[in-house]
Image (spheres, helix red, strand yellow):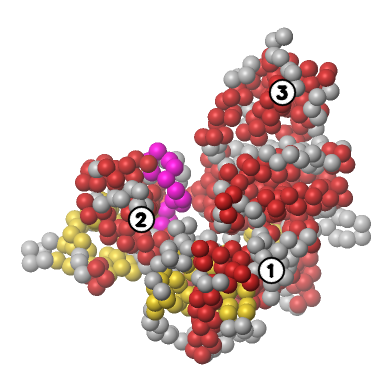
Amino acid sequence: MANKTMDQFYTNFLEEIQISVDADLSGWNIEDFFTSIMLEYLEEAGEANDYVMCPFRGYGLQLNAYSLSEDYEKLTIYVSIYANNDRPKAIGQSDIDAAIKRAIQLYQKAVNDLYTSFQKDNDTYEFAISLHNHKNEIKTVRICALTNGLVKPIDFKNIHIGDAEVSFSIWDIDRLYRCVMSGKMRETIEINFQEKFNMTIPCIENATSDKYRVYLAIISGELLAELYDEFRDRLLEKNVRSFLQVKGAVNKGIRDTLRDEPDMFLAYNNGISVTAESVEIVRDENGKPSIKSIRDMQIVNGGQTTASIYNAHKDKKVNADLSKVFVQMKISVITSSEDLDEIVPRISAFANTQNKVQIADFSANDPYHRRIEELSRTIWTPAQGGSLPQNWFYERARGQYADMLARESTTLRRKKYKEQHPLFTKTDLAKYENTWEQLPFYVSEGAQKNFRRFTIGVSQKKGKLPDEQYYHNLIAKAIMFRRTEKLVSQQQYGGYRANIVTYTLAFLSYKTAQRIDLERIWKTQALTEALEKEIVEVSKFIQQAIVNPPGGANVGEWCKKEKCWKEIREHKYEISTELAAELIPVERAKKEQNVDSSIEVTENDQVIIDEVFSIPATTWFELSRWAKETQNFAPWQRSIAFSVGTLIGRGKKPSIKQSIQALKVYNGALEKGFNPGK
């Protein structure tokens, strides 16, 4: 993207939209595809989080996408204005005002009775019923207009609808272009403490190097929580953590201190490390410095602390008194832009003592992703019949594919390039792999969160880099995922296609112990008839399971919970004999999975692994023989029992996938009369 003119950027942007249109499985119109691409950019910029594509148009109403916080206090409604122009054109204020008015009317109807207009398995129903049920909890509503046109500045005034304060913002193509071209892929945060909070922050300043200056300060917990409340992920852009909920020992410790000993927080906590582009200093009559403003404030270490303080403040159960909480802050101002990319990651890594996750873990520059890119440029698929082979294109960095298409001089040549080079992105890759690794609840969290989880897992495993076999399997998973999307769309379930797809394939991965013949899919570039039929059958009960969550819970949020997966995983289902006949042996499946790209083992997973490991190897061998003699269980299940016994006999623990299947066989055998040692 570097050094592109606005026209070049806009041309590539339209190309990205067209790529999505060509792969259409959703029934969206071009405005919806524009919305999706725009929000992908904004998510990378930290301007959009956990958004849900939800196109709806009614008389005087419009919704393209929305985002609703877990506590239902913050709602963002996205409305789009798309003009099918080859170059950016001016969009008048009247068009913006009309779109915003449609969004306001939508909100007003949604908190009332709009939900009665939809079936319960519809995406828009979830939006409307959520707003209706939680209308008294909504505190802020942001209506964001998205357009591929050019909009002159508009001075919006906030309004109130009921108890909610409603604000307005616009992202036009020029604002997006400037954000991307800045090289930061986010808008710069500028905080003037004197103007905004009527205060300055006393500090100690130190300059011992030409490369940077350091400022040491102590700020209040109230101020830090207020900053996080306003800027959220934009403050943590360079941080390595994604704070989701209080579940780690460190987070619980922070929470307990905030609740029980807020005045001791400064003594117990290491504080936060911040980088900045510049810091403006003012001095009192004695020459003592204070921070008046910070430009481009980024918390590179201490995101966990920051988010914990904010969440403890919002959580009524914790009831933290932030007036007694103070946090030490070290601000490093990198004076040379040339040193920025080198020094900032080091500050993050060296300051980070709370866990081993480092900034590179969130990066597509990880050696794993670079290796996939290399393989994708050199490996071609087997030719099928009279058709030409394909060379799948892995887009490790946004814009690579559009750049390649721009080199093709005619529309026909660009069309041929797309046909011969199917695109898959880094978030697509994470989606395929985490689905196969039976983590559909992570995939349901959204593209960026799932990618981060996946990349952290890859970095922590530190396994060997992918080879050709791994790449063959990856493309097979891509083919399987995309074909499943089409099959699910054909069933016309009404909504939640993305969730149905990932849960369907994760369930098949689980039920077959990952013994679907991926190499066969690679060689034929297609699924077998038996596998396609199985996908359709599984998707039927998956759809029913996720659209009827316990207690009438929010469907989207339910799909993000591991409990949802655990309940689905226990569903009584027998693989058809046709598909069973196609499954490959366990040992071959294990051999072909030559890079373990799964997410780190959770505490619950470890309990299962330890339980399996506690059963002697001789018992597993005995179980395998007993199952064969009595014709209990499928051959692959008997093979798993034998494989687990072999691992334990060598003092090695089985993987979580092996452990889950083995424990299921073991418990089932006990129910059928298996008596170890007899």
Observer-side mark, 2 or 1, equals 2
User: Residue 486, can we see it?
Assistant: no
In the orientation shown, which residue stands out farthest toward the right?
386
Which residue is labeled 2 in the image? 314
Q: Residue 264 bears which disc, if any?
A: none
What kind of residue is marked 3?
Glu
The first of marks 2 and 3 along the sequence is: 2
Distance from disc 3 to disc 1, alpha carbons, whole Å, reads: 51 Å
Distance from disc 2 to disc 3, alpha carbons, whole Å, reads: 48 Å
Residue closest to the eye, 309 or 411:
309
- Neighbour class for label 3 at 10 Å: few (<14), some, many (≥20)? few
Could you tell me residue 73's position as x and y percent? 43, 63
Observer-side mark, 2 or 3, equals 3
Which residue is labeled 3 in the image? 671
The span picked out in magenta is 236-251
Helix, strand or loop under label 2: helix
Helix, strand or loop under label 1: helix
Query: Which residue is at a point 37% across and 65% down the rendered structure image?
Result: 230
Residue 247 included in the magenta stretch of the image: yes
Quadrant containing the C terminus in the rendered view: top right
What kind of residue is marked 2?
Lys
What kind of residue is marked 1?
Ser
Q: Cβ–Cβ below 8 Å for labels 3 and 1?
A: no
Picture layout, residue 534 above or below residue 463:
below
Residue 328 included in the magenta stretch of the image: no
Could you tell me residue 659's position as x and y percent? 64, 30
Which residue is labeled 1 in the image? 20
